[in-house]
């Protein structure tokens, strides 16, 4: 029986970039607006965050913004104070210490930068992902996003953090990327693709993300997610699809 009680999608900012960053070889010259999402999962045994968005300090401080993003190929994200995960938590009467686990699907800056807001927290991530991030295997890893006071809990494979939650290996975008299946008390399960599929187009047309460490693995992961969604009658939730996002419930609304 699932332990999940509520599922909150959280908008933590926006990025704007050439579509080929999301759909390899498709959409050159088309600039898309992509939501940056995190998710709060409340359970009978505690609270889990899937991803934490960007480090707000690197965006709010002009000097830091210039240092990190002036020459960044994807451009600076857009984010305001209210879009920090800790700001959403505060509106629920919660603080960082009320989070039991932060689960990072991967460690790119727009998914793990916000770890700085959760000192002392237990952070679950695939072991291959932390290795890739520390080796800065692509430009979307920021070294100091990892230089934070957290307790790393490295995972070697797929596992069940709690009944009703399954962490699924979906490498390709990054070496240790993991998606998550969330089984709700009512209604269809939600399958968070993470960046294994930025857009619905990645899933429908089976197009790998533009940024990949391994294109064949990325395509296999897309097909794996589609198989699981069919088996579980789950809603596939792409991570950076503005049109999809606009059709879903938004904070403070939740799924239960």
Image (cartoon, rainbow, N blue to C red):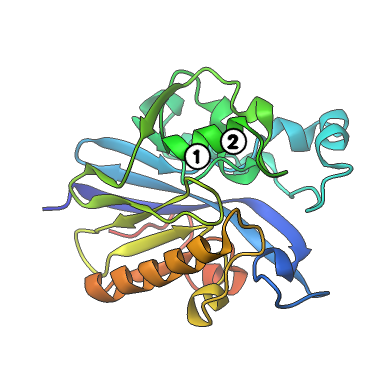
Count of labels in the image: 2
At horizontal 67% and vertical 70% (from top left) the residue drawn is: 24
Label disc, if present, on residue 133 of the rendered structure: 2
Mark 2 touching mark 1, by CB under 8 A? yes
Instruction: Quadrant for residue 16, please give it.
Output: bottom right
Q: Is residue 101 above or below residue 138?
A: above
Residue found farthest to the left: 1
Q: CA distance from mark 2 to mark 1?
A: 6 Å
Most extreme residue toward the bottom, as rendered? Answer: 205
Q: List x then y, in percent, for residue 131.
A: 53, 33
As rendered, which of 143 and 250 lies closer to the eye?
143
Query: In the image shown, does 95 or 124 lie closer to the viewer?
Result: 124
Mark 2 falls on what kind of element? helix
Q: Residue at x 48, y 60 (%)?
A: 250
Please identify the quadrant where the C terminus is shown: bottom left
Pointer 1 residue: 129
Residue 3 against residue 242 in the figure, above or below = above
Q: Is residue 34 left or right of residue 1?
A: right
- Taking the spot 82% from the left edge, 30% from the top edge, the residue there is 64
State the SS at label 1: helix
């Amino acid at each position: 029986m699932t332990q999940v009680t509520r599922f909150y999608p959280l908008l933590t900012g926006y990025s704007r970039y050439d579509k080929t960053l999301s759909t390899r070889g498709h959409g050159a010259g088309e600039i898309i607006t992509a939501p940056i999402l995190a998710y709060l999962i409340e359970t009978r045994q505690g609270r889990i965050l899937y991803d934490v968005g960007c480090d707000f300090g690197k965006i709010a401080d002009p000097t830091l913004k210039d240092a990190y993003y002036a020459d960044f190929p994807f451009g600076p994200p857009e984010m305001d104070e209210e879009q920090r995960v800790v700001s959403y938590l505060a509106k629920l009467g919660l603080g960082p210490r009320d989070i039991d686990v932060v689960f990072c699907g991967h460690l790119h800056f727009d998914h793990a930068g916000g770890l700085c807001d959760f000192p002392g927290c237990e952070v679950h991530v695939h072991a291959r992902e932390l290795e890739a991030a520390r080796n800065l295997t692509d430009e979307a890893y920021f070294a100091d996003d990892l230089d934070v006071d957290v307790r790393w809990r490295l995972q070697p494979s797929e596992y069940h953090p709690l009944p009703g939650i399954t962490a699924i290996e979906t490498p390709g975008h990054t070496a240790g990327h993991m998606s998550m299946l969330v089984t709700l008390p009512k209604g269809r399960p939600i399958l968070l693709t993470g960046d294994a599929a930025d857009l619905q187009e990645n899933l429908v047309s089976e197009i790998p993300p533009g940024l990949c460490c391994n294109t064949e693995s990325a395509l296999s992961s897309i097909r794996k997610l589609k198989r699981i969604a069919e088996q579980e009658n789950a809603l596939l939730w792409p991570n950076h699809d503005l049109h999809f996002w606009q059709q879903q419930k938004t904070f403070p609304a939740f799924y239960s």
